[in-house]
Image: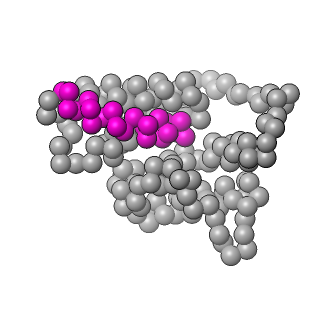
């Protein structure tokens, strides 16, 4: 495949990569770095992508692997904790609910957060997400269930019938 064609195909997936990176890292600067690392690695290793394969899934897998490697490396470094500034609360109810949801997503274990972002935000099927995460479909569904239940509990949106958050899109 010609480099220009490959770059053109990748360009269409950058918004999805940015959304996924932002959800994984919970930090705009770190997300931009993650996207850049992903794109750099994809371009450097473009001959490993099979032209008949799903480019978006391949890119998301690269990003997920980079993020996991960064998490492993971060465990050995001291962690800085950000403190919210209570002097500037959002004015609108919708902004408060979104901030509450984002905090709840950030508090999820990394495995649940990745599963939720791939299915609910990126719109991957259960089979695609399970394949990308290299886990059985049932494990993915279990992680999604636990993530949705945790979000519902954290945001006060639990329903008696087991209803939970279905999709962000």
**Residue plotted at (70% across, 28% down):** 81
Confirm whether residue 69 shows in the render: no
Left or right relative to 82: residue 8: left
Residue range (magenta): 3-24
Residue farthest to the left?
1
32 to 119, vertically: above or below: above
Residue farthest to the right?
87
**Residue plotted at (26% across, 29% down):** 7
Point out residue 73 in the picture as x, y percentages from the top left corner.
49, 28
Our reading of the magenta stretch's main secondary structure is: helix
**Residue plotted at (66% across, 43% down):** 102
Viewer-nearest residue: 4 or 140? 4
Point out residue 152 in the picture as x, y percentages from the top left corner.
69, 59
Confirm whether residue 127 shows in the render: yes
**Residue plotted at (47% across, 24% down):** 33
Left or right relative to 66: residue 80: right
Point out residue 165 in the picture as x, y percentages from the top left corner.
62, 61
What colour-coding does the image apply?
one colour
Left or right relative to 159: residue 15: left
111 to 73, vertically: above or below: below
Q: Is residue 78 magenta?
A: no
Q: Quadrant of the N terminus?
A: top left
Point out residue 86 in the picture as x, y percentages from the top left corner.
84, 31
Which image quarter: residue 9? top left
């Amino acid at each position: 495949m010609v480099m220009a064609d490959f770059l053109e195909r990748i360009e269409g997936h950058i918004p999805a990569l940015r959304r996924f990176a932002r959800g994984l890292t919970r930090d705009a600067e770190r997300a931009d770095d993650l996207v850049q690392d992903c794109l750099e690695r994809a371009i450097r290793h473009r001959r490993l992508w099979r032209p008949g394969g799903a480019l978006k899934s391949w890119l998301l897998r690269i990003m997920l692997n980079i993020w996991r490697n960064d998490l492993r490396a971060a465990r050995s470094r001291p962690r800085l904790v950000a403190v919210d500034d209570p002097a500037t609360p959002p004015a609108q109810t919708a902004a408060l609910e979104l901030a509450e949801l984002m905090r709840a997503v950030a508090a999820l274990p990394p495995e649940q957060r990745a599963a939720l972002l791939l299915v609910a935000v990126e719109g991957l099927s259960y089979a695609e997400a399970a394949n990308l995460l290299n886990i059985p479909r049932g494990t993915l569904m279990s992680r999604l269930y636990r993530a949705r239940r945790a979000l519902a509990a954290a945001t006060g949106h639990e329903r008696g019938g087991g209803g939970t958050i279905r999709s962000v899109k």
